[in-house]
Amino acid sequence: MALFSVNQNGQWFTVKGYQASALSNVGDIKINSDNQTTKSAAKKIWFEYKDAAGNKRSEVINRANGGRITVVPAAVMAWTPSGVTITFDGSVSDPVNGEVYGIYVNQRNYHALGDNEFMELGAEVRYGSKFNFDVESTLVTTAGEAVINNVRLLMVALKQAFVRNLGADSDLYTVTVASTATTAGVITIMPKEQAWIQGTMQAERVILDTQDVFLSNVTINTIERNDWATIAATTGTPVVNTKDIADMEWFYLGEHGDTQRLAGYPYANAATINGSIYKVDPTNASGYDLVIIHHNYVGNGTFVQKSEQDIMIAMPLADATTHTVANAFLGGLDDYFTSLSSTIGSAAETIEF
């Protein structure tokens, strides 16, 4: 086999299995070198990959030209939603009849228009026996929102008003009121995972921080105060990196992808090419580990300027904590780069070679 460069700066492989010798199934990868006897002494290393359209080879990694290997566990790339809790402070005052209570959120980067773009989202209710959201409309509690006391009555009304005022922006947040008597006065506002279309609509992140949330002034014992509740940060359930990895595969397939990406459109679309050209499963609930090998190609004779290149290898988890494919691949790679961990850890790892 000729060992030459195809002059491709980035190469992407979605790996489903590691093989020490023969490639058996689509998605299998193996490691080759110019010294299979003493692998740690190999000078040139490359990967063979079984694709639906036939076997493919990575660029050749020449150890003498230097480089680095970065291992990124799926959990490191997960997005953890950051939200806020608004907790009524009974030590300041009970709800004051006739006072207008309001919560306001300055939504930064509103609809991805930039960090300097804000949209104020909020709600106001006048505390009393009736909460007017529309003409002749009164507060209606749902399952889990039963009124326990006056504090809960106020917070449920604020929550419902906030959700109503979101309107078309209801895709931004989940808003809940705690359901137990001991935490009856707590509203939680948590960003939602946003809509996503592979290669077309990026998985955006809604930013929400305590500095973006404000409370109205209310008159308590003739003094205007806005400390009738406390605002604190909270976090939600992490969202795995599957969609980010799917987007990376879409754009990083390079020359291979350029010749096949949506060829035959509109008869070929993302659904028809997933599983063949594109092998990242966007519905994978466990995420993908990622290995990035940054290396340099140097030509012969007068063509000695270094050309930096990357080989990116994504491997699915078997479940939330089982890195079967990545551990097998790293175990094989460790034969060549002995300073590399042979299994996935909890944090990202980078070694130089």
Image (tube, grey):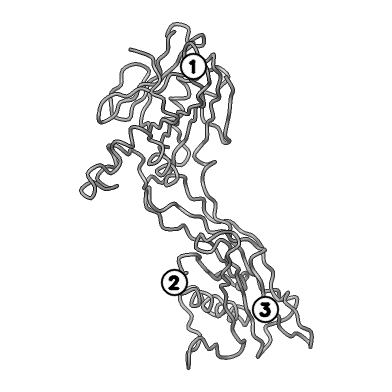
Give the mark nearer the N terminus: 2 vs 1. 2
Q: Are marks 2 and 3 in contact (CB under 8 Å)?
A: no
Vertical placement of 126 versus 324: above or below?
A: below
Question: Looking at the rendered structure, which numbered label has been put on residue 347?
Answer: none
Name the quadrant containing residue 148.
bottom right
The residues bearing labels 3 and 1 have C-alpha atoms spaced at a distance of 68 Å
Label 2: few (<14), some or many (≥20) within 10 Å?
Answer: few
Residue type of the residue flagged with mark 1: Phe
Q: Label 2 belongs to which residue?
A: 168
Residue closest to the eye, 144 or 119:
119
**Image point (25%, 31%), residue name:** 52
Residue type at mark 3 is Ser
Residue bearing the label numbered 3: 216
Residue at (33, 26) in percent of width and height: 28
**First in sequence: mark 3 or mark 1?**
3
Q: CA distance from mark 2 to mark 3?
A: 24 Å
Residue 54, percent from left and from top: 26, 26
| Amino acid type, residue under disc 2 in the picture | Ala
Task: Give the labeled residue for mark 1.
Answer: 303
